[in-house]
Image: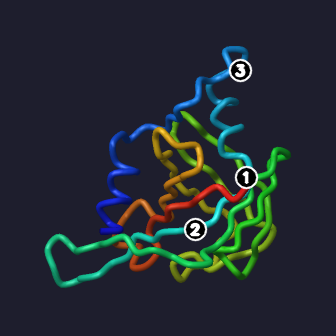
Amino acid sequence: MLKSKIQSLLFPSSIFLFSCAPDSNLPVSLDLLKKIIGEWQQVGSFNLVDESSNPQAYDWFAVEDGFLLRLNENGTFDYTKYTDCTTGRYEFYPDSKKIEFNFDCEINFNGVSVSKITEFFDGSPPQNDRLLLAHARSSDLCRESCMSILKRVE
């Protein structure tokens, strides 16, 4: 039930759009940036459920008290998914639908210590309060929390 509800919310379109009209005085990239600024909390996770199937089977799961992501207007972030280090600066690339996170220290990302990661996003039309964030582009790298559904907190 949750899976079909989430799919109906997230997959009607694969582009980052919202129902409210953009400010005609703003460039599209600035308008999109303004829409993702704020605090988000993970409410769903895309996890591997059957590694032996071909192709491997993944499913959506509801998440209670998920990680928080705060994107600040000044280009800084707080991101509690990676507990080794939670702060740094981000760069937003609306044309390629990605966010580059440059952490203040190293994090453990899929078993590797890094200080920079790129995550890909997609919005949930027509709502302004949902964001789909892909933590890995390849299922070979990901077993749990490969993608997350985030809900706007403020």
Residue flagged by tag 2: what amino acid is it?
Answer: Gln
Q: CA distance from mark 1 to mark 2?
A: 19 Å
**Residue at image x 66%, y 40%?**
35
Name the residue beneath numbered marker 1. Answer: 90
Q: Is residue 26 above or below residue 126?
A: above
67 vs 6, left or right, is: right
- What is the crowding at mark 1: few (fewer than 14 residues within 10 Å), some, or many (at least 20)? many
Q: CA distance from mark 2 to mark 3?
A: 29 Å
Closest to the camera, between mark 2 and mark 3, is 2
59 or 142, nearer to the observer: 59
Closest to the camera, between mark 1 and mark 3, is 3
Residue 26, image quadrant: top right
45 or 103, nearer to the observer: 45
Name the residue beneath numbered marker 3. Answer: 26
Q: Secondary structure at mark 3?
A: loop
**Residue at image x 51%, y 50%?**
121
Which residue in the rendered view is the most extreme toward the top?
A: 24
Instruction: Mark 1 or mark 2: name the one nearer the start of the chain.
Output: 2
Residue flagged by tag 1: what amino acid is it?
Answer: Tyr
Q: Is residue 154 above or below residue 126?
A: below
Q: Secondary structure at mark 1?
A: strand
Name the residue beneath numbered marker 2. Answer: 42
102 vs 131, left or right, is: right
